[in-house]
């Protein structure tokens, strides 16, 4: 008995010694920029099983669908309030010719998708199917035009086909193909990764091509925002060249993918990893803030009035290929939930300039929202972060600071042990999310809100048994949000014990 008591005491001492105590301060009286809902955007490409055998199974499929679009995928995307979808690529955008994807499906040509394995592309999913998808889930359309193998004329004609309410031959063709009213193209991109798969161009050459092309992208109704294809990672030359374009430009895209190793040829496994790759991945995810800061410095100099937004239209975790799976299919663990949350916290802090972000990609590809197998669908840990964070869409960001935030350190990697974000939602409520990056140690948190009285708080927590826990078709609920009790409201402070490797989303009245 005495021995048990001694052991218990030793455990309690050990546990309390390990729990870091941190005060997080939210200043509700000094709101920052609005967190655009477009930061919660999606990206879908003709790649692997993102579209075919993913979101789109065809109207003859036994899987419940609406004109070929899987009902369960539509519902899942609707539930996370997807605000925008970028399509048809990616690299594929620069080989896509839109006329192949209209008209009776059995008359559409079969082409080859040379970007992703040279596979046969039936073109069964084209412009009409894409707009049915975005309209079904209530999202805006971000259409990526083909600069690499296309032309200003081809892009201008595609825009006319999609948006004209005239009686031009192209508008009439759209009607003949079943769509009377023009569609709304909210965003139009000119090429993709033009430094690489989009044509191996130099930034100055692309900037001139952009100037020329964007001049002809005219519509008679609401003008889409025009997005230039920019750089990636720490590269700034593209932002430098494109931020000097004076007309017809609303955004410059930028891409950043997170890998555990930082070595493209051996990125690391999606599921088989130890703590070293947990921290290396989170550390690399956090580098997005430096990459943004580097672009912001240039934009601040060349575009001080803030005409041009930074569009992270591809981001997310990218692991080694899964043997035997479709292209770029990867599982999605609790670690990916953290990759998503950390990106959002950074995007929120830079919401004045970062106006869109599109995770790669929605279904069965890279850091997906959902995975499908036959008629089964599983929601990923990343999906749950998107769902928990819905209240941040179009919310007003609030400054967050910490008193003595301890680091979480392992080997050569050092990251802050906590990451928090806060905002006032469109419903007037305060929202805060705190992620504990330390996979072993809980944290005692005092969350102090200045400038707003606190009455009560409710919260959800996303965590799991292990860093590499994930949802499978057999066990779809291994990583899913659960109600989080134990928040004590004391005056203007919320007190809680944040478990190790957990993300807690709090709504405060
Ligand atoms: O998302 C997969 C690919 O990554 C995209 O097609 C390309 O733009 C990027 O390199």
Image (cartoon, rainbow, N blue to C red):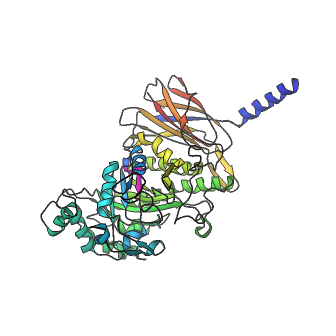
Taking the image as drawn, is residue 300 in sight? no
Q: Is residue 31 magenta?
A: no
- Identified at 42% across, 42% down, the residue is 390
Magenta: main secondary structure equals: loop
Magenta residues, start to end: 38-64
Q: Nearer the viewer, residue 443 or 65?
A: 65
Q: Percent from the top left, x then y, of residue 300?
A: 38, 57
Can you tell which quarter of the image residue 490 is in? top right
Residue 96 appears left or right of 386? left
Q: Nearer the viewer, residue 76 or 35?
A: 76
| Image quarter (top left, top right, bottom left or bottom right) of the C terminus | top left
Can you tell which quarter of the image residue 488 is in? top right
Vertical order, 45 against 289 (above or below): below
- Identified at 23% across, 62% down, the residue is 162
Q: Percent from the top left, x then y, of residue 219?
A: 20, 62
Taking the image as drawn, is residue 442 in sight? yes
| Image quarter (top left, top right, bottom left or bottom right) of the N terminus | top right
Question: As drawn, which residue projects farthest toward the right?
Answer: 2
Q: Is residue 62 magenta?
A: yes
Residue 468 appears left or right of 83? right
- Identified at 38% across, 75% down, the residue is 111
Vertical order, 84 against 457 (above or below): below
Q: Nearer the viewer, residue 96 or 412?
A: 96
Q: Percent from the top left, x then y, of residue 461?
A: 55, 37
Q: Percent from the top left, x then y, of residue 255?
A: 45, 62
Residue 133 appears left or right of 489? left
Question: As drawn, which residue projects farthest toward the left?
Answer: 167
- Identified at 46% across, 58% down, the residue is 361
Q: Nearer the viewer, residue 201 or 221?
A: 221
Residue 339 appears left or right of 357? right
Vertical order, 70 against 328 (above or below): above
């Amino acid at each position: 008995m005495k021995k048990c008591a001694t052991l218990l005491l030793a455990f309690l001492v050990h546990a309390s010694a390990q729990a870091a105590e941190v005060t997080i301060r939210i200043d509700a009286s000094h709101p920052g920029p609005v967190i655009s809902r477009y930061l919660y955007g999606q990206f879908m490409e003709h790649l692997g099983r993102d579209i075919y055998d993913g979101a789109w199974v065809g109207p003859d499929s036994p899987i419940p669908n609406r004109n070929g679009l899987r009902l369960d995928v539509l519902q899942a995307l609707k539930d996370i309030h997807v605000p925008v979808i970028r399509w048809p690529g990616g690299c594929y955008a620069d080989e896509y010719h839109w006329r192949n994807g209209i008209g009776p499906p059995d008359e559409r040509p079969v082409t080859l998708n040379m970007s992703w394995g040279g596979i046969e592309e039936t073109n069964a999913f084209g412009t009409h199917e894409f707009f049915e998808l975005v309209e079904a889930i209530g999202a805006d359309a971000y259409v990526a035009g083909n600069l690499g193998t296309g032309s200003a004329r081809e892009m201008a004609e595609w825009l006319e086909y999609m948006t004209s309410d005239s009686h031009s031959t192209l508008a009439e063709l759209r009607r003949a193909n079943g769509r009377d009213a023009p569609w709304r193209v909210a965003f139009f991109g000119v090429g993709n990764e033009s430094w690489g798969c989009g044509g191996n161009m130099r930034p100055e050459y692309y900037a001139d091509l952009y100037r020329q092309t964007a001049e002809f992208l005219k519509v008679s109704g609401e003008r889409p925002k025009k997005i230039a294809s920019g750089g990636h990672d720490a590269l700034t030359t593209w932002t430098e060249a494109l931020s000097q374009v004076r007309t017809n430009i609303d955004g410059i895209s930028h891409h950043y993918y997170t890998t555990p190793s930082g070595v493209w040829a051996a990125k690391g496994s999606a599921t088989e990893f130890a703590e070293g790759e947990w921290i290396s991945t989170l550390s690399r995810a956090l580098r997005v803030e430096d990459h943004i800061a580097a672009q912001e410095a240039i934009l601040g100099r060349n575009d001080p009035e803030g005409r041009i937004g930074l569009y992270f239209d591809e981001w997310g975790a990218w692991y080694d290929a899964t043997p035997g799976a479709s292209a770029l299919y990867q599982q999605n663990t609790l670690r990916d939930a953290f990759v998503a949350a950390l990106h959002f916290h950074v995007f929120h802090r830079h919401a004045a300039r970062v106006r869109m972000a599109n995770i790669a990609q929605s279904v069965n590809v890279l850091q997906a929202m959902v995975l499908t197998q036959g008629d089964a669908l599983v929601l990923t840990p990343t999906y749950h972060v998107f769902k928990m964070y819905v209240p941040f869409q179009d919310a007003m960001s609030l400054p967050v600071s910490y008193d003595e935030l301890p680091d979480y350190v392992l080997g050569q990697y050092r990251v802050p042990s906590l990451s928090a974000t806060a905002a006032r939602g469109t419903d007037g409520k305060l929202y805060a999310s705190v992620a504990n990056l330390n996979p072993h140690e809980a944290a005692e948190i005092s969350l102090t809100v200045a400038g707003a009285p606190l009455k009560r708080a409710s919260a959800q927590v996303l965590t799991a048994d292990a860093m590499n826990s994930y949802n499978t078709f057999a066990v779809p609920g291994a990583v899913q949000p659960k109600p989080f009790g134990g928040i004590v409201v004391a005056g203007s402070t919320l007190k809680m014990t944040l478990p190790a490797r957990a993300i807690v989303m709090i709504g405060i009245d």
